[in-house]
Every structure is written in structure tokens, then in C-alpha cells.
Image (cartoon, grey):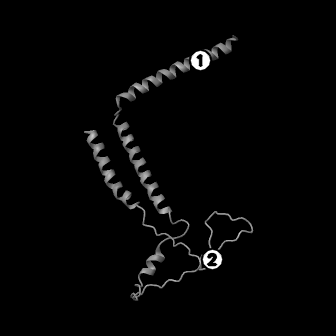
Amino acid sequence: MTRRIIAALLAGALAVAGPAAVAGAQEPTTSAPTPTAAPGTTTAAPGARTAPGATTTAPPPTTSVPPATTSAPPAATTAAPAQAARDTGPDAGDRAAVVLLLVFGALFLLGAVLWALARWQAWDPPFMQRWRHATGEAGWRAGNAWSEFTDWLRIGR
């Protein structure tokens, strides 16, 4: 009967934690436009160095005819508040980290509750009984060895 209760509690906790994991999904991001150079100027690659006194020649400016476009209707005015509401400050990426921390905290708490419930019901796997006996025996032997050593020091060798 107790294993059924533990299984039911585990299933219920996973059902509750399921929507929280989905809520932690990252929002789509947009990339910043790349800067373009003015005609007749050259730009060096980031981190590239030029020798002092060296000159670079600019490629001849090319003229291109922009394609004919039809004028688009003006954008809806509701798009501006939506973009203004988006957090773009230095703490913009903290939301995903906080949600992830909450999910891991909830999973840790669930594990602690299940462990406490198993201990309260006095359920131990067989290897734990053997391990507990072996460590108790090792502690008893180490304690005896220490007692023998302190007696040896007290007697005066």
C-alpha cells in the first residue's frame, strides 16, 4: 500500500512540475542588424591590424537601382507598446535562469519529501542495511584502534 501512495505522490508532483518546465522555454530572440560602411570607405575586420603607414584602397563605388516597391500600409500602433514592454535591460536573461532554479528547487524538494516518507515508513533497500552494518563495524574498529593508540601513549611506550 505504501508504494502505491509514493507512486501516486510522484505522479502528482510530476504533473504539477510539467507546466513549470514548459513555461521556462526561452523566448525567440532577434539579432541586431550589422553595420554597413559608407560608399568609398573601408572597414577592417574586427581584431585585424594594419601596418603603420600602410594604405588601403577602396573599391570603386557601385551604383545600384533600388527595386520598385509599393508603399505598404502603416504599421499597427499596437506593435510599439508590445516592443516597449519587452525587457531589454541587463537583467533580461534572468527570467529563464530563475525559472530553471525554481524547477530544480521543486525537484529537490520532491526528492526530499519522498526520501522522508520512505524513511518514515521504515523502507530501506537491502543494500542500505548491509552498508549501515559495514560502516558501523568499521567505526567500531577505528575507535578501538584509536583507544589502543592513546593507551600506548599514556603508558609511556
Q: What residue would you read off at disc 2?
A: 41
Q: Position of residue 74 (x, y in %)?
A: 41, 87
Q: Is mark 1 on a helix, strand or loop?
A: helix
List the residue tagged with mark 1.
Answer: 147
Q: In what quadrant of the picture does the N terminus appear?
A: top left
Q: In which quarter of the image is residue 77?
A: bottom left
- State the CA–CA distance, disc 1 to disc 2: 86 Å
Instruction: Please state the horizontal and vertical placement of residue 138, each as a whole percent of the image.
Output: 50, 21
Residue type, numbered disc 2: Thr
Q: Check the image and report above or below for 118 versus 28.
A: above
Q: Which of marks 1 and 2 is in front?
A: 2
Few, some or many C-alpha atoms within 10 Å of disc 1 (few <14, some 14-19, many ≥20)? Answer: few
Residue drawn at x 46%, y 60% as measured from the top left: 96
Q: Residue furthest right?
A: 53
- Bin the neighbour count of mark 2 within 10 Å (Cα to Cα): few under 14, some 14-19, many 20 and up: few
The mark that comes first in sequence, 1 or 2, is 2
| Residue 94, position as x, y percentages in the image | 50, 62
Identify which residue, 39 or 98, lies in the foreground. Answer: 39
Q: Quadrant of residue 90?
A: bottom right
Tag 1: amino acid: Ser
Residue drawn at the location 47% of the way across and 24% of the way down:
136
Up/down of 95 relative to 123, above or below: below
Residue 93 as seen in the image, left or right of residue 71: right
Camera-side residue: 144 or 51? 51
How far across and how far down the image is residue 149, in percent? Answer: 62, 16
Residue drawn at point x = 43 percent, y = 23 percent: 133
In the picture, the quarter occupied by the C terminus is top right
Q: Residue at coordinates 48% horizontally, 85% vertically from top-left? A: 65
Does residue 70 appear to the left or right of 90 in the view shown?
left
